[in-house]
Amino acid sequence: MKRAATIILNRNLPKPTDLLYEHLNKYDKEWTDVYVLEAGSEPENLSQYCTWDIREPDIIEHGLRYGRGMNLGLLKLFNSGKWKSYDAFFLLTNDTELNKCATIKPLLDILDAHPRVGILSPCSKKWGERHLIGKGSTKYFWFIHNHAFFLRRQMIESIMEENNPTLMDFIFDGSNFRGYLTESELIAKGYANDWASAITTKVFAEENESYLLEKSELIRTESFEENLKLYIDEGKSWVKRKYGFNSHWTMQQYVKSFYDAFFQHHPSLEKYRI
C-alpha cells in the first residue's frame, strides 16, 4: 500500500497538470497515489488523468481555489474508504514544479524522523528561508507561504471538521475564498494541537507564476493585479470578521504565540527552532 496521496488541483490547464502527474508517476510511483481534481474545467481542458470532474454551476463560474479545492479532494478520500491507508497527503496546485528526483519519499522520511511535525513544506530555491535552514536540513517555522503542503494524516484528523464536513470546512475555511492568510490559519491550528510546521531543503518545489500572469483568461479568473487586490481586500474583511483584526502582522503574532508555546512543551526540539 502506498503511504501518501497527492491531490493536484486543475482549472483549464491540462498540460502542466499532466506534466506534474507524470513527474510524480516517474519519480514517486512507489510512494504515492495521485488524484486530479478538476475545478470546473471545460471538457476540452480536462487533464487526461482526471479523477474527479466537479461541474456544479457555481464552480464552473468561479472555480474552487486552493482552500475549497483541497477540502473537497480530502473529503472525497475521507469518504472513499482509503483514508486510513495513507500516512500523509500532498496538496499541490498544478503550477507546482518539482526537481527531477523523488519528492515523496524524502518527505515521508522527514515525517518519520520528526514525529511532532504535522505540516511539512518543500523549500523554494527563491526563498530566503533556505539560508536559515541550511543545505539538506529541516527547521520548524511559524510562517510558510506555499501551495505545496505535505500534511500528516493524524494532524488533519486533529483539526478537521467531523460533523457533516463539506468543501467549505474540512480543514480550510472556505468562506476565505482567495486564501488570504490561509497558511497562517492552518499553521496556528497545527501548533494549537501540538503539531509543528516545518520547511525542508532536502527537496524543493517552485511555483510557476507565469500561468496566472499569462493565462488568467483561460483559467477563467481575474488578472494577476485584480486578483491580488481582491485577495487583500476580501481577505482583510474575512480575518477581521473571524478574528477581530485585519492586520497581517497581528495574525503573525497570533501564530507565533502558539509556536513559542510549542517549544515550551517540547524543549528537546529547540534545535529545530529558527
Image (cartoon, rainbow, N blue to C red):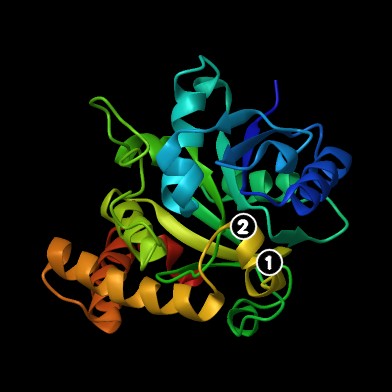
Q: Look at the picture and state if 266 lies above or below 135.
A: above
- Where is residue 134? Give x, y as percent: 67, 78
Q: Which residue is mark 1?
A: 215
Q: Residues within 10 Å of mark 1 (few under 14, many from 20)?
A: some
Question: Residue 263 appears in which quarter of the rendering?
Answer: bottom left
Q: Report helix, strand or loop for mark 1.
A: loop
Residue type highlighted by circle 1: Lys
- Where is residue 65? Give x, y as percent: 48, 53
Nearer the observer, 87 or 59: 59
Q: Look at the picture and state if 168 lies above or below 132.
A: above
Nearer the observer, 271 or 253: 253
Q: Quadrant of the N terminus?
A: top right
Q: Give the left or right position of residue 21, taking residue 35 as reference.
A: right
Tell me the tag on residue 219.
2
Q: Look at the picture and state if 11 lies above or below 165.
A: below
Q: Residues within 10 Å of mark 2 (few under 14, many from 20)?
A: many
Give the residue at x 56% y 38%: 88
- Where is residue 54? Give x, y as percent: 53, 33
Q: Give the left or right position of residue 110, taking residue 196 as reference.
A: right
Give the residue at x 38% y 51%: 195
Give the residue at x 53% y 62%: 221
Does any portion of residue 117 appear in the rendered image? no
- Where is residue 212? Give x, y as percent: 63, 69
Does any portion of residue 78 appear in the rendered image? yes
Q: Report helix, strand or loop for mark 2.
A: helix
Q: Give the left or right position of residue 93, taking residue 158 as reference.
A: right
